[in-house]
Each structure stands twice: as C-alpha cells, then as structure tokens.
Amino acid sequence: MFVIIIGLFKKVVIANEMAYVADTLFGSDIAELGVIGMVVGGVAFTFQIYFDFSGYSDMAIGLGKMLGFNYLENFNYPYIARTITDFWRRWHISLSTFFRDYVYIPLGGNRCKGARHIFNLFVVWALTGLWHGASWNFVFWGLYYGMFIFFEMLIGKKRMKKMPVPLAHIYTKLVIFIGFGIFYFENLGSLGTFFKALVGANGNKLTDTVTQHLFMNNIWLFAVAVLFTMPVIPKIKEKALSAKSTAYFMQSAGILCNAAILVLSSVLLVNTTNNPFLYFRF
C-alpha cells in the first residue's frame, strides 16, 4: 500500500501539475515565449515525465506485491547521475535491460571491435527511439543519447569520474534537458522553434508575464519535485529507524504521512478530469 500511495502522489500531485505548467507554456506560441519560459517549460516536462512514469511503475510494483509478484525497481533516482551512461542505468531500467539482453548482446555488444561495435550501439539507440513511436523526433532522441553514450565510452570511465562534480552535474542535466525537449516536440518545425527560442534567436525576450505568473504560483511544486528526485527522505528514514529512540516515532509519522498523501491525492483526483499516464501513449 505504501508503494502504491507514493506512486499515486507522484502522478497526481507532481506529474499532473507539472504537465499543466509545461502544456501552458509550450501550448502557446513558443516563438514568442521568453528564454526563461522555454527553460521553465522544459524543466517542468522533465519533472513531469519522470514522476508520471516512475509513479505508475511504483503503483505496478505495489499491486504486484499484493498479488505475489516481485517486480524490480524501474527508476533509481536518475537525476542524481553525473554521466549519461549512469543516467541510463537508473532511468527506465526495464527498457534498457531489455535492449541490452535482446538486441545489443545478440548483435555482439562490446565484444565486437571498431565499426561493428559503433554500429551495434547506434542500432540499439535508434530502436530505443522507435520504441516510443514512429516519429522522427523519437529517432533523433534515441540517436542523440547514443551519441553521448559513445562520446563517454571514448573518453573512458576513469576520465569521466575525474570531472569536477559541479561540472559533471551541469553537463548531465543539460543533456537530459535538451533530450526531453527533442522528446516533447513531435513536429520538427516546433522543435526547431524550441531550439531557437532557447537562445533568443526568434527575437523573443528574456522573460514574459505568463512565465513569471506560472513559476511564482508553482515554486512550491518545483521545490517538492527537486526534493523527491534525490534520496533525501529514504536516508533520513533509514537513520531514524536505525536508532531505537526514534524508530517508533518514525513508524508512526510514516503512517500519518501516508494517510495525508492518500487523502490529498484522492481530493485532487476527484477535482480533475481523466488524466491518463503519459507512457500509455507508447
């Protein structure tokens, strides 16, 4: 029940609200949207897709446990990754594992050398893009990540680990942000406008009133989203439960928090129309 409630919270409280922010900004004339508006919309969609997908994965895992099935975790805090390779070890683990076991390894994987290894790598990533839909933006999205995986492979794990931590996080988050921009805009014309607007090449301003209003009204939402992308709460819980003096308190607090989250999620569900999971499209 706990896992289901957390998944419901991710979907209803965070993902749905982030979807409203992203769709409001990107649903307008993005050529006129300010640079900060493009960034806020992109960040909102980045949070939306993570909490939507990990939310329904959590709910599936919880339902499975009720029926005696033990499904593996599908997300392992992917936004704390410091490389794109590590990001894909943490993001949508079931999909990346499937392509590794049933496409990459049968093709020869990294046992092949030179051009054949590169071919195997990009075939996997092209298929990963096509798995999401028969649209060019998904193919570009898959090849885009394949390019960075190949880039990191050339540099080597040891050199990537030597990169300063702040720089590593900036690099990874920037690649992820642009990647989900490619993922969002299925129309290639809109995708081109998105990239131009990010750097003000459309003649758009730095900011706009719509972005300012949306961000200020939802700043709490972004703060909660950032908190839940990091393993902060599990670590606090683990330390508290390990101490006998706080274990009972934490167990009681956990039950109360779960009840509050369930009530909040239920209220939001009652007050909204049908809002299916984003990944039902794929």
Image: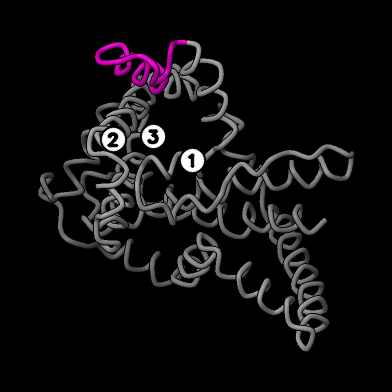
Q: What stretch of residues is rendered in magenta?
A: 107-125
Task: Tell me: residue 143, above or below residue 276.
Answer: above
Residue drawn at 62 percent across, 55 percent down: 10
Few, some or many residues within 10 Å of mark 1 (<14, 14–19, 20+): some
Few, some or many residues within 10 Å of mark 3 (<14, 14–19, 20+): many
Q: Cβ–Cβ below 8 Å for labels 1 and 3? A: no
Q: From the top left corner, tell me how far across and down residue 52 is, in percent.
A: 58, 46
Q: From the top left corner, tell me how far across and down residue 89 is, in percent.
A: 48, 40
> What amino acid type is highlighted by mark number 1?
Arg
Cα separation, mark 1 vs mark 3, equals 19 Å
Q: Which residue is mark 1?
A: 89
Q: Which residue is mark 2?
A: 148
Mark before the other along the chain sequence, 2 or 1: 1
> Mark 2 or mark 3, which is nearer to you?
2
Is residue 171 found inside the magenta-colored segment of the image? Answer: no
Drawn side of residue 255 relative to residue 40, left or right: right
Residue drawn at 23 percent across, 38 percent down: 155
Secondary structure of the residue carrying tag 1 is: helix
Mark before the other along the chain sequence, 1 or 3: 1
